[in-house]
Amino acid sequence: MIDAKDYKAIDAKDHKTAYALGILHEDMRKDYLKAIEWYEIAHKLGEKRAAYALGIVCQNYIKNYEKTIEWYEIAHKLGEKRAAYALGLFYKQTLKDYPKAIEWYEISHKMGGVQAAYALGIVYEDIFQDYPKAIEWYEIAHNINKDRKAAYALGKLYDDILKDYPNAVKWFEIAYDQGNTNAAYALGIVCQNYIKNYEKAIEWYEIAHKLGEKRAAYALGKLYDDILKDYPSAKKWYEIAHKQNKKHYGAIVRIAVMYLEGRGVNKNMIKARSLLEKAAKGGSEKAKQILALFDANKSK
């Protein structure tokens, strides 16, 4: 490991050495005051990277937010492209000054910052509820570098807020094609609940299941159970859901009810009770309620 003493023989006017000492004290020694001292020396000696490094240390470790802004702005003036985005993020997350966040994100975007457009979409959606602006920025983000996060965000916006399900499907499919695995499960939900295309819903849930989405098996069970009345398939998927997660007591309760009612299986009160007791022991309130009714009816 390099130690500060190893730099003694090096010219004190070397900006690269001063910057390296700043990194050493920041990353290795966690001596942030010393890091600031060396970064400031490096900055005075003309090291352009030092101002941005000072902004990071002042923000994350010293918690001097006035100095944070000062150093990031100096870094920005020196041509450090990351500084504008850092300022946008800082104003949004730490100071909650959203107009300022937008101002700096837009500067970052104009400078070619690829993250800024997506960040602007989030601010307009979550903070200002300006959905046309959010859509505009998400689409810009997607067009810049095929940002799959932006495609998924557009799908969620059209799905959850605007209730425009054809557009939700369009953007979820784009997100899926670009590698967003969450999109397959989202497509299953939209196709089931809003488009009412159950064949497509099954297709997407099965894709989501193969991609490791644990919620998909239970969703398939409920679709086969509640809507398609295909009880053997429902039971199969409930069992898969429980196998994936032994604490998935919702699946156990559903199978128990099938045994209680004889849906897709022969009625078996002993089996039903055993499953309900297992779920109740795991904390399922639904199982406890059914057991209470079970015992009440038995005592009559």
Image: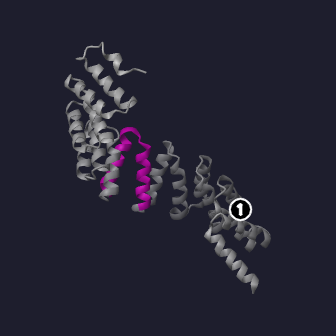
Of all residues shown, which one is farthest toward the front?
A: 5
- Residue nearest the viewer, comparing 255 with 46: 46
| Residue 239 position in % (x across, y down) | 70, 58
Horizontally, residue 29 falls left or right of residue 295, namely left
Horizontally, residue 222 falls left or right of residue 164, namely right
- Residue nearest the viewer, comparing 156 with 47: 47
Position of residue 172 relative to residue 70, above or below, is below
Of all residues shown, which one is farthest toward the bottom?
A: 300
Horizontally, residue 40 falls left or right of residue 202, namely left
- Give the residues drawn in magenta, as a range: 131-160
Q: Amino acid at mark 1?
A: Lys
| Residue 231 position in % (x across, y down) | 71, 65
Q: Assign the N terminus to one quadrant of the image.
A: top left
- Give the main secondary structure of the magenta stretch: helix
Position of residue 81 relative to residue 174, above or below, is above
Let me know if residue 149 appears in the view.
Answer: yes
Alpha-carbon neighbours of circle 1 within 10 Å: few (<14), some, or many (≥20)?
Answer: many
Give the residue pinned by disc 1.
235
Q: How is the image coloured?
A: one colour
Q: Residue at x 31, y 54 (%)?
A: 124
Horizontally, residue 248 falls left or right of residue 297, namely left
Q: Residue at x 44, y 59 (%)?
A: 159
Residue 152 inside the magenta-drawn segment = yes
Q: Residue at x 24, y 26 (%)?
A: 48
Residue 39 position by quadrant? top left
| Residue 63 position in % (x across, y down) | 29, 43
Residue 288 position by quadrant? bottom right
Residue 269 position by quadrant? bottom right
Classify mark 1: helix, strand or loop. Answer: helix
Q: Assign the C terminus to one quadrant of the image.
A: bottom right
Let me know if residue 112 appears in the view.
Answer: no
Residue 52 inside the magenta-drawn segment = no
